[in-house]
Image (tube, rainbow, N blue to C red):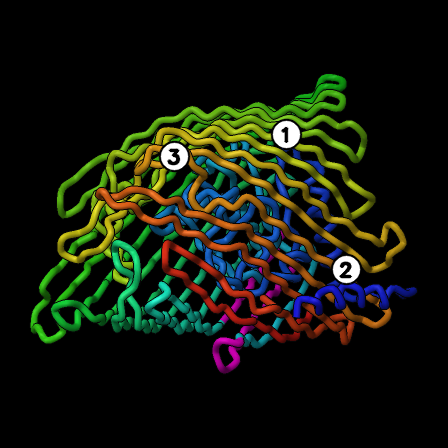
Amino acid sequence: MKQLLTILFLAFHLFCFAQTTINIQEVLIEAEAEKDAIGQQKESGVSKIVISAKSLNNFGHHSAGDVLKRFPMMMMQGPPSFNRNVMMAGLDKQFQSILINGERPAGGEDYRDLKLDRIPIDMIQNMEIIYNPPASLGADATIGSINTILKDAPDKKFISSDLSFDYTSTHPGINPEFTVSLGNRWDKWAAMGSYSLNNFKRTNLNAISDGEIHGTEREELNVWIHGFSGMVSYKPDSIQTCKYQTFFSVYSEELDFLSDIKRRTKGGLDIAADTADDDKLRILHTHNLSYRIHKNGWDWNNSLDISQNIDTKDRWRWRSADSGTEESFEDENQVNTELIAKSEIKHPFEWGNFKNKLTGGMRFSALNRNYQRMVYTKTADHLFWDDIEDGSYLLKEYRASVYLSSEMTAGNWWIHPAIRFDDDWGTYDTYLGKGSIQYTSINPSLHSKYRVSPNFFIKGDIARQVSRPPFNLMVPVDKIKNKKETIERGNPELVPSTAWNLGLGLEKYVETQGFISFRGFYSRLRNVIETHEVGIDDVYGYRILQAVNVDSGLVWGMDVDSRLNLSDWGATGWAVSANVSWMGSQVRDPGTLELRRLNGQPVWTVNSSIDYLNTRRNFQISMGMNYLGERITAATVSDGSTIDALTEKPFLQFDSRIKYFFAPWGSIYLNALNLFNQTIEIRQGSVSESEIIGRNFVVGVSAYF
């Protein structure tokens, strides 16, 4: 069936004939957005990629992760159309910072991470991948930052809407999805609002075998996502601007799990019945109030952010055990509330050919994390619970930051030195006792850009980055995970991971909407946080996992990235993009004390896409390819026993989209993910797993007025 891909690519050439220009609103908006994104990337002295609405629309539907995984050094955890956690350069999710409008939302769940399926893609204006952020941008970004920028004040009145239906080959039925956005500007006022509803159902089927015993794990998922974003701006004069922005997301998930197989703690499989019912509800709301004064070159910005993340999870489980049928109930509730106050002032200076923009800022954040988790276990025929485990805690965390930066321009040089001081402190309270945390860090950075010609640049950067330990890894409580049959044990001795990152890149911009870039990086990490097995629990028989700071680590890599509008060379309507990333690393295994790669880091990722727009026939075709190389979790030693290496085989996915513009203001489209029905293949020792993902299709109609 893969031969079909080659045929489709060749067939595209048959459509290359003279075209006429028509006024298709969506095409014009996407073209302007793409031109603006590449312009931002070109003008920036920092190495970053700006993802425009065109890329988001082509291959993103449920989650921004569907789009992010197609860019250099980017990987996602989770099957296609269900991408949640970001991994940059193969590092786990706590080593990068996920932002909304430049700030972290409250909480960030256990790993300080924001799951990207919380943000409906229709609410995103653009995204920025910043590979080595300057000190002025913030901390908790050992390997990089991803900034999600929501739709902002419009220049004129607009209304847009989209209605679609989702279908996956592993689950019967279709699921509705809907979004509507509207905005306007009146003299001194501007306002914008957007509402989105997404529903999708999935069946994940995992076939497991050790050569002698065969079984399956089956998950039935039903997900609803409601999202709302809004903005009101008031500009009384040419000096002042007041703005209020809000984002609200409700994510609900029902999961039914059924299995006839059990993994042995020491390896291999057993026949055992296992069933579970999960209910999750996640509510996130953020509010930002800002006031800006711009006068005589001075730019003073003040903002106050208040955000709250409410997360509830209930899980009932029944499984076979030596004593009979075991029943368990996991009850988890957490409320994370955060306040951020920020003040920043900028002032440019100019002496002849030398320009300098000084920036100074202060930032204070206060986080209250109330985490309640109880796990109850008993034999099914017992009246009362046999075991009750309390994994609850109350965490209060504060951070005060001061930063100073300078952006100097002289001739063809742009130089951006910056320094940031962070002071973190806090307390935690568990049923076992109380404790405190205290970190202080000084993080300098230096970014530079040299203009070889108007469209050719050399960029270099060096920066010290820091990432605080994830919440659940540092607070000394046990988090029992019945589904995975593991216990995650907190380690209060953890310290932040730090890194010195070096980067060097070349960027060549071509005509109006294209570029070719090369970037290499080298990162020396200290106190890398990795989770390893420390024993077997006497009560549950589960593996105990605990995070530790390993000695040090090295991460390196390089990538080649390109986006080209072939219309500039006479191939009207054609655009292509491609990138290749190569990565390496070295850390010392805490179990074997031997040097190895980072767990889960692939050597290669490759992405490409081709897009064809025919304005004579009013249609657009896009096709993309995403390749993720082999990923290995290394063998290690735990409690005197060897734990076999886990290998996830290379994964190759093809996606496509076809769109027909039936009017200047409207279109219909068909999206297809995982066209060739690839499966995820995993092997650990004698046990092999094959996860059936299925194909996903979305058909819809969109309008823009």
First along the sequence among labels 2 and 3? 2
Mark 1 or 2: in front is 1
The residue where tag 2 is placed is 28
Closer to the camera in the image, 522 or 364:
522
* The residue positioned farthest toward the right in the image shown: 18
Q: Does the magenta segment cover residue 179? A: yes
Q: CA distance from mark 2 to mark 3?
A: 46 Å
Amino acid type shown at disc 1: Leu
The residue where tag 3 is placed is 528
Residue at image position (75%, 24%) is 412
Span colored in magenta: 169-198
First along the sequence among labels 3 and 1? 1
Q: Measured from the top left, where is residue 539 in percent x and y? A: 13, 56
* The residue positioned farthest toward the front in the image shown: 212
Closer to the camera in the image, 113 or 403:
113
Q: Is residue 372 visible?
A: no
Residue 187 is left or right of residue 678, and the answer is right
Q: CA distance from mark 1 to mark 2?
A: 34 Å
C-beta proximity under 8 Å, tags 3 and 1 = no
Q: Is residue 299 above or below residue 57?
A: above
Amino acid type shown at disc 2: Leu
* The residue positioned farthest toward the bottom in the image shown: 173
Q: Is residue 568 visible?
A: yes
Residue at image position (19%, 43%) is 429
* The residue positioned farthest toward the top in the image shown: 351
C-beta proximity under 8 Å, tags 2 and 3 = no
The residue where tag 1 is placed is 504
